[in-house]
Image (cartoon, rainbow, N blue to C red):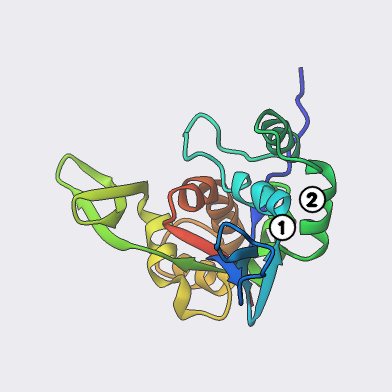
Amino acid sequence: MAFPVVAPLVPIGQFIGTMFAGPVPASNTAGQAQSWGYGVRLGTELEDLNESEFGIWALSHGTGNDKVNTASRGAVEKLAGQLDIADAQHSTDALLQRGLLARVLPVAAQARGFAQHHQLMPLGMGLGNSASALGAFTIGQPGFPRATVSAVIFDVWAFSAQGASLWQACEKTADWGEELTPESLALLVLQALPVLLATDAAYIDVC
């Protein structure tokens, strides 16, 4: 029995925190600043997300669970309902339209198009591999490993910010003698994104 190919939701942009407005309105008897939204930097622009939009955007990062390697729209919106996040479908549509979410089928043509227009931005420190697991490379902070990836994904992660796009990083890594084409490497990166994004080992930006 053939199962349909699911296009994962990929969150785009860097979260820069909850933003508060001032001065405090006189009607605010609690004396607290009022939050105006959640800030996400997208390229050179600052995007303001409301609570529902931020909930969807955050859930689309996934859980880092190796058994759940795809944050599909259906899965994200179902979880949003369980968490009482209102207007999940409308918020997903709005985020897709604003470029804060992308849907990318795991096929070569879509992976290449996504990689050409986006950049993988590394976060944390590379912690290398170990004598007992030569092909597994860890990302995080000393004493606090967050993500473990293959050697080739680690290479892309380590040098991705040096190129103008994720595609350029895939081309450079493929040129280093790996038995991979840039297209097949872009597919592998796409498959690794849930682990990298859920653990804050990287984020995706536009280029």
- Farthest residue toward the left? 131
Q: Which numbered disc covers residue 121?
A: none
Q: Is residue 199 above or below residue 97?
A: above
The spot of residue 85 in percent (x, y) is 71, 39
Q: CA distance from mark 1 to mark 2?
A: 9 Å
Element type where label 2 sits in the image = helix
The spot of residue 186 in percent (x, y) is 58, 58
Q: Which numbered disc covers residue 91?
A: 2
State the count of labels: 2
Q: Residue at x 62, y 64 (%)?
A: 34
In this rendering, the label closer to the viewer, 1 or 2: 1
The amino acid pointed to by label 1 is: Asn
Of the numbered discs 1 and 2, the one sitting upstream in the chain is 1
Element type where label 1 sits in the image = loop
| Residue placed under numbered mark 1 in the picture | 50
Q: Residue at x 24, y 57 (%)?
A: 127
The spot of residue 139 in percent (x, y) is 32, 55
Compare residues 182 and 41 and report the one nearer the observer.
41
- Asked if disc 1 and disc 2 are in contact, CB closer than 8 Å, the reply is yes
Q: Is residue 165 above or below residue 174?
A: below
The amino acid pointed to by label 2 is: Ser
Direction from residue 112 to residue 131 in the image, left or right = left
